[in-house]
Amino acid sequence: MRWALIGASTIAAQYMIRALWAEGGEIVRVVSASAERGASFAAMHGIPLSGITVEEAVADPDVDAVYISTTNEKHLPQALAAIAAGKHVLCEKPLAMSLADAVSMVRAAEEKSVVFATNHHLRCSGSHRAVQSLIRDGRIGRVLSLRVHHAVHLPENLQGWRINSPAAGGGVIPDITVHDADVVRFLTGEDPKTVVAQMAASGLGQGVEDSVMSVWTMPSGVMVMSHESFTHPFAGTGLEVHGTEGSIFARGVMTQNPVGEIELVTAAGREPVAYDPHDLYGEAVRRFHAAVAGHGGPAATGWDGVKSLAVALAVREAALTGAAVDVDYGGAK
Ligand code: NDP
C-alpha cells in the first residue's frame, strides 16, 4: 500500500509513520500547508516527496491511500478530495466539525467504493480487547455500568489549537470524548442513547472547554460515567466495567501505548488479566491494509467515526444547555 500523508502532524511523526512502515506500507509523499515544513518533515522521516496541495497528492497514481491528520476543520475537504480521486482514506478523529459533514464523507466513500476508516486506536489495543472478551464471556454477569477515566495533562507541545481554537476543532470533547464514546460502543456493542454533561475551562482552555464530565444512558439501561480533561497531571487513566457477577478494573489503559494493568474481581477473588501488548496504531494499519485487500473491514469504520462524533456533539450540547440530550446519529448505519 502506497500512502500519502495529509498533514505534517505530531501524531504522524510520533506514531503513524512507524506503524505504516511496520505494517508493510510505503509512504510516498506528505502534504503540508507550508512548503518549508513539509520539506523538512519529509526529509526527517525519509519520505521522497512533499507538496502543499491535497489535489496534487491525490492525483498521483503512485498513491493508493491517504492518512489525514490535519486539524479537524480540514478533514472534510481533504477526505472528499481523496475519495473523489478514488483513494482509500484513513482519517483522524473527530472525522469532522459537524455530524452532517462526517456523514457526507462516509457516504461519499461508499459511493466511490473506497475503504474509509476512522483512526480510533483504543479499540485496537490488546487491553481493550481483553476487557471486551471478559464481558462477552459473561465473566462479570450482566453489565450494569462503566466508568471511564480519561483526564490527562495535555503535553506542552500540543498546547496550541486544541486549547485555543474553536475554528480548528479545539476542546477536550472533540479530542478525547470521541475516543471514549468509541471505547464504550466497542465494549458494550450499544450506541449511547441520552447524555447529560457539565464542562469547564480549568486552566488551559481559552474559548474551548478543557474538562468535561458526562453520564450516558445506553439502550439496555447500562449507565456510563465519562471524564475527560487536559488539566490533570496525576489523575491517571482507567476503565471500569461493573456487572452483576464481577468488576473489571483496567488501569492506565486510556493511552496510545500498549500499557496498563487489568484486574478481574469476582466472588472467587482478584485475578490479573493478561493481554497481547501489540502496537495499537500498527493494528489499525494492519486491519486497514487487509480491508483494502478485501479481507474484512477496518478496525473502526467511517460509521464508527460518525457515531463517536455524534456522542461527543451531544455531550457538548448537553453541557451548553444543561438539558438531557438524545444522541442524534444522523442516520448512521
Ligand atoms: P498537530 O498540531 O501536531 O498537527 C496538526 C497540523 O498542525 C499539522 O497538519 C500541521 O499543518 C500543523 N503543524 C504541526 N506542527 C506545526 C508547527 N510546528 N508549526 C505550525 N504548524 C504545525 O496535531 P496532532 O498531530 O496532535 O493532531 C492531528 C489530528 O490527529 C487531529 O485531528 C487529532 O484529533 C488527531 N489525533 C489523533 C490521535 C489518535 O490517537 N487517534 C492522537 C493525536 C491526534 P500542516 O500539515 O499544514 O503542516
Image: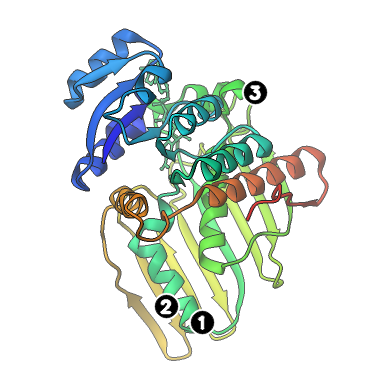
Q: Quadrant of the C terminus?
A: bottom right
Q: Is residue 255 visible?
A: yes
Give the image location of residue 108, x and y in percent. Answer: 56, 38
- Looking at the rendered structure, the secondary structure element under dot 2 is strand
Callouts 1 and 3 close, C-beta under 8 Å: no
Dot placed on the residue nearer the N-terminal end, 1 or 3: 1
Residue 61 x %, y %: 30, 27
The structure residue drawn at horizontal position 24% and vertical position 32%, both measured from the top left corner, is 27
- The structure residue drawn at horizontal position 54% and vertical position 45%, both measured from the top left corner, is 110
Give the quarter the ligand 1 occupies: top left
Counting residues from the start of the chain, the first of labels 1 and 2 encountered is 1
Residue behind mark 3: 207
Judge whether 313 appears above or below 158 on screen.
Answer: below
Q: Residue at x 68, y 65 (%)?
A: 218
Q: Is the residue indicated by label 1 positioned so its CB lies within 8 Å of ligand 1? A: no
- Distance between mark 1 and mark 3 Cα atoms: 42 Å
Q: Secondary structure at mark 1?
A: loop
Whether pointer 1 and pointer 2 mark residues with C-beta atoms closer than 8 Å, the reply is yes
Q: Is residue 288 left or right of residue 228?
A: left
Q: Which residue is mark 1?
A: 140
Kind of residue sitting beneath label 3: Gly
In the rendering, at what x and y percent does residue 47 appear? Answer: 20, 25
Tag 3–tag 2 contact (CB < 8 Å): no
Query: Which residue lies under the disc numbered 2?
Result: 264
